[in-house]
């Protein structure tokens, strides 16, 4: 970050059995917090797994959900408020269970670790739409964040060009977003997070 001028960091949901909110990662998050880093949180393969089922199907969204939960329960979101989190895949399952998690607000440990309340922390996050372009996904996502915190993503090349094309068609034709909202999701929402790249794009015409 200091020497190479990186614009952001990609972090996994955890390492082995330890999720990103674990104490072992505090020094890393603290150093990035000092630099107000943008973090793209992407799930990694679960250390448990499900036989005969690709980790991309269930494990990845569940790992993302667990990672967000660990950031809340550990107090990382409260301690490192200068970090900007961009969560892959529409936040996994977390938007769907956000109300359930919020029932922990006002009781320990959340009184200490997440005093602002679950939904307040979620509204500070950004969520990409990769592998989320489906009628079941967006209604939940839109209850926990505003459209200006939803950004574009495809998961290409992990997902095929056909998958990307189908997702794009759904996003444009069936998602319920207005034309202005689609423009914002496509690029406008993410630009303030990466001012150097935004300036380079503007200079390139």
Image (cartoon, rainbow, N blue to C red):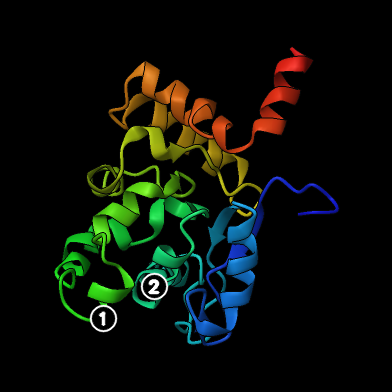
The secondary structure type at the circle numbered 2 is loop
The secondary structure type at the circle numbered 1 is loop
Q: Quadrant of the N terminus?
A: bottom right
1 and 2 marks in contact (CB < 8 Å) = yes
Residue at 45%, 30% (x, y): give it: 185
Sequence-first disc among 1 and 2: 2
Spot occupied by residue 39 in the image (x, y as percentages of width and height): 58, 55
* 62 on left or right of 40: left
Q: Is residue 14 above or below residue 42?
A: below
Residue at 17%, 67% (x, y): give it: 100
Q: Is residue 182 above or below residue 140?
A: above
Q: Is residue 17 above or below residue 95?
A: below
Spot occupied by residue 53 in the image (x, y as percentages of width and height): 47, 75
Question: What residue does disc 1 label?
Answer: 109
Q: Which labelled disc corresponds to residue 51?
A: none
Marks 1 and 2, how far apart in space? 9 Å
Res 162 → quadrant? top right
Spot occupied by residue 63 in the image (x, y as percentages of width and height): 45, 72
Q: Is residue 42 above or below residue 177?
A: below
* 72 on left or right of 32: left
Spot occupied by residue 135 in the image (x, y as percentages of width and height): 28, 43
Question: What residue does disc 2 label?
Answer: 75
Farthest residue toward the top?
A: 205
Q: Quadrant of the C terminus?
A: top right
């Amino acid at each position: 970050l200091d020497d190479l001028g990186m614009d952001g960091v990609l972090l996994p949901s955890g390492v082995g059995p330890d999720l990103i909110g674990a104490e072992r990662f505090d020094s890393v998050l603290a150093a990035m917090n000092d630099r107000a880093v943008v973090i793209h949180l992407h799930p990694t393969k679960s250390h448990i797994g499900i036989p005969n089922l690709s980790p991309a199907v269930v494990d990845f969204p569940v790992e993302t959900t667990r990672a967000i939960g660990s950031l809340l329960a550990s107090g990382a979101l409260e301690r490192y408020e200068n970090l900007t989190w961009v969560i892959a895949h529409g936040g996994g399952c977390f938007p769907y269970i956000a109300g359930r998690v919020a029932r922990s607000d006002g009781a320990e440990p959340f009184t200490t670790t997440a005093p602002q309340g679950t939904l307040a922390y979620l509204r500070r996050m950004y969520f990409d739409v990769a592998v989320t372009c489906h009628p079941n996904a967006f209604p939940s996502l839109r209850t926990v964040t505003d459209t200006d915190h939803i950004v574009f993503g495809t998961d290409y090349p992990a997902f095929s060009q056909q998958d990307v094309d189908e997702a794009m068609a759904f996003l444009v034709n069936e998602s319920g977003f207005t034309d202005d909202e689609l423009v914002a999701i496509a690029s406008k929402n993410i630009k303030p997070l990466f001012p150097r790249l935004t300036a380079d794009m503007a200079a390139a015409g």
